């Protein structure tokens, strides 16, 4: 702070400013910012005599030294101001203004606010007031905030914020830029300004002055108050205080601007620090003058080596010409010009993208980004797309891109050949039109599951209509493609023509059924022959004896009748033995029991039944226990049990919609048993039939004989197992077969 020496002018201290030193450097004085004011010289319009008096009560004045150092004349008898005293007072105030202006012209930013507080105290003592406040508000005076204040001890504490609604008259005066002067409070305040009168009364103010100063978009108001007595506010004093207020407003405005600039620069530095791109500034001649590079890894040389040099001396010749042309285009169009180039850095080809724009001063700013990773990713994506396009186009199986609604977006030549349509005609059709109606429901059900996120892909055998009307069997594999936000886009479908394989499988299945039928016929024929041969003699004997007995009865021979009937009894018993011998023979010829892997046996039967399941559109699921599922049994008889149960389940679902036909085969391995379950979603069985379902000739099918489940129960029983059945809670039936290990 400046050093102070005190003289007096009507009791107010005088000040003298010495050089202000900061870091051992003497600040050079700047030109005084108010033209026409200098020490000992006033502007022409202010050349009249002005007496600057203290606010102390009248009659308390004392003599003071004049500016020229000579003795001052005594006051006149009338008490008028002495000319020498007036000049001295004026000079002292001008000196105060000069010191005040010089201080804030040289004060560092961090000293401005402390300087304002210090100079407010000096000013209060200089003019003899009890309180000086500096308020800040916007041009509309929406709210006034107290920024700086000085007051004598004992002055009532005032609010640091004023709402315009609380002092409407006063705020409106300041908004209009009018100075408010009140020598006697509350008499000089309009009677309508009730709030202002009460505000002054609460503070105990006797005299007050408010000086508004506009600085850009901000209004500063300097208020001067006296509580120890009334005082006057002469016009000359008000004008000088207005100058003081302007100096304070200028200093605070500069502080605000510098702080905003510092905040902006700090923000810019933070942004540049987080900015991954390289920034270069070149002058009109193409010379590097600035650069921002967080990393030097993408530079040909460090910044200190290329700053101050022309780009032709730094960059390869072709690249320099490229940027020179971009600079010329940016200067002509005043638009951003983009430049893509490749630069060998440290033995590696790197790809860059530059955006060039001209600054207001004519310099060129180039923002450069390393896009090598993006370039490599783009190349990788392009290669992947090319590979997919080649595989799609030249694939031997049919391929298509299908929208979520079933529209064909792209098709390859193999699919066109498979269905017999030209590409343009096929692209105009929907998947629903090409599919056999009975197969459509299952396909759409899987598609809905994929869209819902339950599955990512699915596989199903289905039938398509050829252009000539025939049926094409195909194995469809469809995978759903999603975007980065997991939104479904389209299906990639592979359609493999299995018509020939399907026909061959149907022929094999037909031959298998015929062979099984012929085996049964042959077995029945052999059994019939054996029974006829073995039973022919006993039956013949029974017949003859019976006829003889009848004749004996007619002729009245009781003894002979008894013998005949004894022979009939013996022949009948012998016929029963024959039947038992045949049955025993059949059991004796059955293959012996061996170790059977039940899971493997199930998979073999499922393979045999695959065509039947597909033909009936049954969706098969196998939940096989991974533990060892071996048991002791006859594999042929166990296959017959499982085959019979699967056929019954398939036939039970014949009247159910295709999308609801589900068959689940499960195994569960326990310590001493293995459980096999076959669950379907068919029509089930009436509760009354459940008790007799394993009895011979009991059936729930209109065309059934009723011996299949009876045979299954006998086979399971022969294996010391148990076969049971129950209706499901919702739909269908479940058969459970428990076999010992």
Image: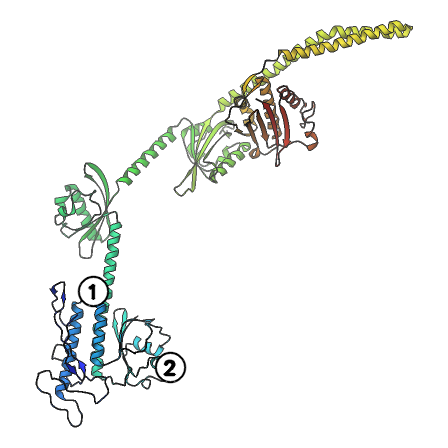
The quarter of the picture where the N terminus appears is bottom left
- Which x, y percent locates residue 121? 22, 75
Classify 218 as above or below 454.
Answer: below
Q: Is residue 540 above or below residue 472?
A: above
Q: Quadrant of residue 296?
A: top left
Q: Residues within 10 Å of mark 1 (few under 14, many from 20)?
A: some
Query: Mark 1 or mark 2, which is nearer the start of the sequence?
Result: 1
| Residue 43 visible, this orientation | no
Dot 2 lies on which element?
helix
- Local packing at callout 2 (Cα closer than 10 Å; few below 14, some 14-19, many 20+) is some
Residue 297: tell me if it is visible: yes
Query: Residue farthest to the front?
Result: 153
Q: Name which quarter of the figure residue 673 lies in.
A: top right
For marks 2 and 1, give the CA distance.
Answer: 41 Å
Looking at the image, residue 362 sits to the left or right of residue 649; the answer is left
- Residue 725 to residue 517: above or below: below
Q: Which residue is mark 2?
A: 194
**Nearest the eye: 490 or 701:** 701
Residue assigned mark 1: 109
Label 1: element kind? helix
- Please state the horizontal and vertical placement of residue 63, each as a whole percent of the image: 15, 87
Q: Is residue 620 above or below residue 143?
A: above
- Quarter of image, res 732: top right
């Amino acid at each position: 702070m400046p050093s102070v020496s005190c003289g007096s002018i009507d009791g107010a201290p005088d000040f003298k400013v010495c050089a202000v030193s900061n870091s051992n450097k003497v600040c050079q004085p700047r030109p005084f910012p108010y033209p026409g004011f200098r020490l000992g010289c006033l502007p022409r319009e202010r050349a009249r005599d002005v007496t600057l008096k203290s606010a102390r009560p009248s009659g308390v004045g004392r003599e003071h030294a004049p500016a020229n150092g000579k003795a001052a004349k005594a006051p006149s008898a009338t008490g008028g101001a002495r000319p020498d005293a007036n000049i001295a007072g004026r000079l002292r105030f001008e000196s105060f203004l000069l010191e005040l202006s010089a201080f804030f012209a040289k004060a560092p930013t961090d000293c401005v606010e402390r300087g304002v507080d210090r100079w407010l105290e000096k000013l209060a003592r200089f003019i003899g007031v009890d309180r000086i406040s500096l308020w800040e508000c916007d041009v509309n005076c929406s709210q006034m905030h107290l920024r700086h204040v000085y007051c004598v001890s004992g002055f009532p504490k005032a609010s640091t914020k004023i709402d315009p609604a609380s002092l409407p008259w006063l705020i409106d005066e300041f908004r209009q830029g009018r100075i408010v002067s009140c020598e006697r409070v509350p008499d000089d305040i309009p009677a309508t300004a009730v709030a202002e009168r009460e505000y002054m009364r609460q503070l105990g103010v006797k005299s007050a002055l408010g000086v508004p100063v506009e600085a850009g978009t901000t209004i500063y108001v300097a208020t001067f108050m006296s509580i120890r007595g009334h005082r006057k506010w002469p016009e000359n004093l008000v004008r000088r205080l207005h100058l003081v207020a302007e100096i304070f407003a200028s200093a605070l405005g500069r502080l605000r601007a510098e702080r905003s600039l510092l905040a902006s620069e700090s923000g810019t530095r933070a942004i540049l620090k987080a900015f991954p791109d390289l920034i270069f500034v070149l002058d009109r001649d193409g010379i590097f003058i600035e650069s921002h590079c967080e990393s030097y890894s993408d530079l040909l040389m460090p910044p200190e080596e290329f700053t101050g040099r022309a780009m032709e001396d730094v960059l390869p010749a072709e690249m320099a010409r490229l940027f020179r042309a971009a600079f010329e285009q940016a200067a002509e169009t005043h638009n951003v010009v983009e430049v893509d180039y490749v630069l060998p850095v440290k033995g590696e080809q790197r790809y860059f993208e530059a955006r060039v724009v001209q600054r207001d001063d004519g310099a060129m700013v180039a923002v450069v980004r390393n896009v090598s990773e993006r370039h490599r990713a783009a190349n990788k994506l392009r290669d992947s797309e090319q590979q997919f396009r080649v595989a799609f186009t030249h694939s031997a199986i049919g391929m298509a891109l299908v929208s979520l609604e079933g529209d064909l977006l792209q098709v390859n030549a193999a699919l066109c050949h498979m269905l017999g349509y030209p590409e343009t005609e096929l692209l105009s059709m929907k998947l629903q039109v090409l599919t056999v109606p009975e197969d459509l429901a299952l396909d759409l059900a899987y598609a809905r599951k994929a869209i819902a996120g339950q599955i990512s892909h699915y596989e199903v055998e289905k039938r398509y209509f050829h252009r000539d009307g025939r049926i094409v069997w195909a194995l469809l594999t469809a995978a759903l493609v999603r975007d980065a936000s997991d939104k479904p886009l389209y299906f990639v479908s592979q359609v493999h023509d299995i018509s020939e394989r399907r026909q061959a499988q149907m022929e094999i299945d037909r031959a298998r059924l015929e062979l099984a039928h012929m085996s049964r016929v042959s077995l029945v024929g052999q059994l019939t022959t054996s029974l006829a041969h073995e039973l022919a003699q006993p039956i013949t004997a029974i017949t003859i004896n019976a006829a003889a007995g009848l004749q004996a009865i007619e002729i009245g021979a009781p003894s002979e009748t008894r013998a005949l009937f004894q022979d009939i009894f013996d022949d009948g018993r012998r016929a029963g033995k024959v039947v038992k011998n045949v049955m025993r023979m059949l059991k004796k010829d059955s293959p012996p029991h061996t170790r059977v892997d039940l899971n493997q046996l199930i998979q073999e039967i499922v393979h045999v039944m695959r065509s039947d399941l597909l033909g009936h559109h049954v969706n098969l699921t196998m939940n096989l226990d991974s533990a060892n599922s071996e048991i002791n049994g006859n594999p042929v008889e166990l296959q017959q049990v499982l085959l019979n149960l699967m056929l019954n389940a398939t036939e039970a679902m014949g009247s159910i919609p295709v999308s609801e036909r589900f068959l689940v085969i499960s195994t569960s391995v326990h310590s001493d048993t293995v459980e096999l379950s076959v669950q379907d979603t068919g029509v089930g069985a009436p509760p009354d039939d459940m008790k007799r379902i394993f009895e011979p000739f009991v059936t729930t099918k209109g065309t059934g004989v009723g011996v299949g489940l009876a045979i299954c129960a006998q086979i399971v029983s022969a294996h010391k197992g148990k076969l049971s059945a129950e209706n499901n809670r919702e739909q269908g039936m479940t058969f459970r077969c428990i076999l010992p290990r």
